[in-house]
Image (cartoon, grey):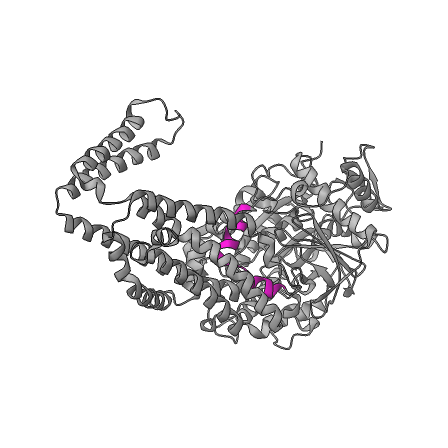
Amino acid sequence: MINKYIRVFRPSKFQPLFQIAATAICISFATRLILLLTFGSQIHGSFLNVFTGLIIGLAFDLLISLFIILPFAIHICFTNNFIYTPKGKWIAIGGFAILLSIFLFTSIIPKDFNRDLYKGVIAYIVLRLIFFIFLYTRSLSFRFRWRTVVLKIFFFITIFLLVFNAVSEWFFWDEFSSRYNFIAVDYLIYTNEVVGNIQESYPIVSITIGVLIIALSIFLLIRKSIGLSVRCPLRFTKRILALAILITGIILLNIIIKPGWKNFSNNNYINEIAANGVYEFVQAFKNNKLDFYTYYQTLPDSTAFQILRQSLTDSNTSFVSSDIFNIEREVTYPGPEKKMNVVMISVESLSADFMQAFGSTKGITPFMDSLAQKGMFFTNLYASGTRTVRGLEALSLSIPPPPGQSIVKRPGNENLFSLGSVFKSKGYVTQYIYGGYGYFDNMNYFFGHNDYDVIDRTALSADEIHYANIWGVADEDLFSLALREMDSNYARNKPFFSQVMTVSNHRPFTYPDGRIDIPPTSQTRDGAVKYTDYSIGQFIKQASAKPWFSNTIFIIVADHCASSAGKQALPVTGYHIPMIIYSPENIAPQVITTLTAQIDIAPTLLGMLNFSYKTKFFGQDIFHTVPGKQRAFISTYQGLGFLKNDTLVVQSPVKIIKTYQPDFVTGDAKEIEDNPEITREAIAYYQAISWLIKNKKYGMLE
């Protein structure tokens, strides 16, 4: 009896499926080993942790391998020689005719069904019918050969993709120190920039040839079993039983295996080693939008807003309404307003530790190191997130980072209360100037619908561009464009607020030759940072000769760090960024050590200008904040960090909250006992912004 059922899985019929599954598992295991060997000095995992990670990873690998072989199992189940017999022929033709009738002569298909897809389905059915009739007129041996060739092609493509994915995971880890995550999903939308970046950054032809050789070698080992599978007869009942068992196994494993299994260690690197890249990609895709109320611990909404209002109360602010859910406030400063121009330079991926002031000995930021001694230098500032859109969100909207996708890229992000809206209400020209194409990351739409005029690389003619890569024009060309716009604003006698977003400090790290002592052919981060520093220096030098310079405040701040990876899921060192506020005739040199969040920059700037205005900002003017109220926000797309009094509260799905004492030098953190007061404040901030966005209450002032 046992042998009867074992024969269902006879190697001659199902051996190719077992081999593909085994190949997928082996490639995933090899990927883990290579990551461990390559990045071992970064990972620092104990033997027990690594071994446990490999075992947990095997479970993820098994589930993914079953998904991979499922299409082949369905093909084997429903394809046999019966359809080529006279009786089977008419059954097959009848089936094609029924499908064609459904699409042509019935009302089953919805009226709003995509017409191009509708035509495509009809064409596919007709072609399959014609091809089936063609095959029926051929000999049986020809049909076997054809089916074998088709299966071999798809098996080879599958093996190639498995190997190519493994190589891609290595490069992704090299860039982001993790498996595929939200960034990988996000980049799928911008295939032109991403593919171009890959082509400019890596020897893609050599890599592809190497992948082809490896995939071909594996394929040659299993090719014979594919032909045997095609020629081996097996009753339909046994084939359907095998398929049913496979589907049942997939369902059970999918229920048993939880995404959180990988998070077994306090070492985030080890957790990422345990993960499976394909599985993580799917999870990131599913969690693109994270509803705070579904995935995080909450307070009663009224309690959350009460805590928030208490936190936002300062000596120079007053709430305009007693409505607990209304955070609109009147901000007042004594004395006249300073109608100074403001230029905010958002620097791509500028980590604090690039600068000499934070311990760097590389000398890659000589201009900014010099400028830090001449302006207001912030040494205790933290970025909200790990992506440019998070930095832009914090700088323009002054809100904590909501879980999931940034507001910049969400639908319905128009007419929000923004820094641009405050400046525009004061009669300013407000501009967002970008060196790339503004459609990337939805920048054009977001800024264009929130009181900014968007100016991107399309404003430059070909002869004005000295160099460009896939991300945009070289920073020196961006600043030339910015100077031109600022001169135009001044000529019209209009004060201006211009936010300039750089792009050169981004892989492939290329820039014009002859500017700095690191050749662009090196394609290194150090070279890109030094070139951006050079470009900023040239811009400030040229701006100093302008008639509007003496009445202008320059802000140089990072959008995020170059890397936010570490043993901890949210290492504080991965969010530490510098900021310099420079206006030599108006601001005395000084060092600001106060804990500052990226969302505090907007209200602090407005306070320096002595502006009185109505606000919905979550940020605070750090120069008018009661001591002890300072806090910062750091986040991934799902990990929500709240930093206060040297305590870090991290909220994670599913309704998990942990409290840490972070090490601000190494980025490590020790889990400590919960501080109820800080935890409730952390929940309140993130819950309140989620409520306001969800209920469309963070709009323009009424």
- Please report the residue visible at 28 percent of the width from the left and 53 percent of the height from the top: 151
In the image, 627 versus 374, the foreground residue is 627
Q: Position of residue 356 (x, y in %)?
A: 67, 73
Q: Position of residue 433 (x, y in %)?
A: 56, 51
**Quarter of the figure with residue 581:** bottom right
In the image, 247 versus 426, the foreground residue is 247
- Please report the residue visible at 16 percent of the width from the left and 37 percent of the height from the top: 86
In the image, 188 versus 510, the foreground residue is 188
Q: Residue furthest front?
A: 1
Q: Main secondary structure of the magenta part?
A: helix
In the rendered image of this protein, does residue 91 appear above or below residue 22? above
Q: Position of residue 520 (x, y in %)?
A: 47, 71
Tally the numbered discs. Answer: 0
Give left or right: position of 276 versus 3.
right
In the rendered image of this protein, does residue 359 appear above or below residue 127? below
Give the residues drawn in magenta, as a range. 268-286
As for residue 271 lying within the magenta part, the answer is yes
The reply to whether residue 598 is visible in this rendering is: yes
The reply to whether residue 583 is visible in this rendering is: no
Give left or right: position of 428 versus 320.
left
Give left or right: position of 630 versus 84.
right
In the rendered image of this protein, does residue 24 appear above or below residue 67? below
- Please report the residue visible at 63 percent of the width from the left and 41 percent of the height from the top: 291
Instruction: Work out which quarter of the rendered image holds the C terminus and state it.
Output: top right
Q: Position of residue 254 (x, y in %)?
A: 52, 49
- Please report the residue visible at 76 percent of the width from the left and 45 percent of the height from the top: 684
As for residue 181 lying within the magenta part, the answer is no
